[in-house]
Image (tube, rainbow, N blue to C red):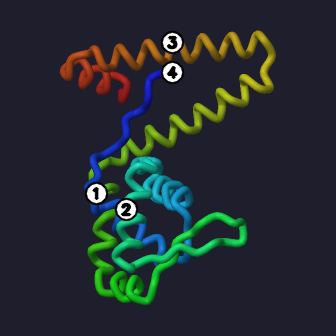
Amino acid sequence: MGPRFSRGPRVRRGDVRAAALSLLTEGPRNGYQIIQEISERTDGVWRPSPGSVYPALQQLEDEGLIAPETADSGRKAFALTDEGRTYTESHADELAASWDAVTGSVDDAEVQLRQLIRQVMVAVSQVSQAGSATQVKQAGKVLNDTRRSLYKILAADDDEEETAAEQSAE
């Protein structure tokens, strides 16, 4: 298995709970849908694991704030109870703060880099599926050169980085 991208910012346990409640105010969702929606709304910066989402859902169910229901697909989804709706209305600012804590902890450059990574992955996939043998070989060389260049960036001193950035801006 290859290297993994960073998991993003550290998120407090309560933030998963708050994000799940916030999403459930919009309608029933299952755990997988909650994970996907959190990832989408944070531009991939925050992708909670099932090991953090499902225990949070269980806790919310134990507190009587949500209840499971079987969706048309046969999968178990969760919906707010009356008590849950009351709670989310009275804690709206707190629930919104869970999103702000995550998205505010990452600068725009990191979000843009993550978006670019996704775009490159799509392009690589397209070349590998539809490209000729020569095109696939060329793409491999580009990716190998890119990997080396990225490691050079990490190996450089901060002073060297600033000088290089200034030169490329000119």
| Mark toward the start of the polypeptide (2 vs 3) | 2
List x then y, in percent, for residue 97: 28, 68
> Residue type at mark 3?
Asp
List x then y, in percent, for residue 90: 30, 86
Residue 116's mark? Answer: none
Q: Name the residue under label 4.
A: 1
> Residue type at mark 1?
Arg
Give the number of the mark in front: 3 or 1: 1
Residue at the image position 31 percent from the left and 64 percent from the top: 98
| Mark toward the start of the polypeptide (4 vs 2) | 4
Left or right side of 141 for 135: right
Q: Element under label 2?
A: helix
| Mark toward the start of the polypeptide (3 vs 1) | 1
Q: Name the residue under label 1.
A: 13
Give the number of the mark in front: 2 or 3: 2
| Mark toward the start of the polypeptide (1 vs 2) | 1
- For residue 159, above or below residue 114: above
Residue at the image position 37 percent from the left and 72 percent from the top: 62
Q: Element under label 1?
A: helix
Residue at the image position 36 percent from the left and 29 percent from the top: 169
> Residue type at mark 4?
Met
| Mark toward the start of the polypeptide (3 vs 4) | 4
Q: Mark 3 points at which residue?
A: 145
Residue 56's mark? Answer: 2
| Mark toward the start of the polypeptide (4 vs 1) | 4
Q: How crowded is mark 4: few (under 14 residues within 10 Å), some or many (20 or more)?
A: few
Q: Residues within 10 Å of mark 1 (few under 14, many from 20)?
A: few
Distance between mark 1 and mark 2 Cα atoms: 8 Å
Distance between mark 3 and mark 1 Cα atoms: 40 Å
Query: Quadrant where the C terminus lies?
Result: top left
Give the number of the mark in front: 1 or 2: 2
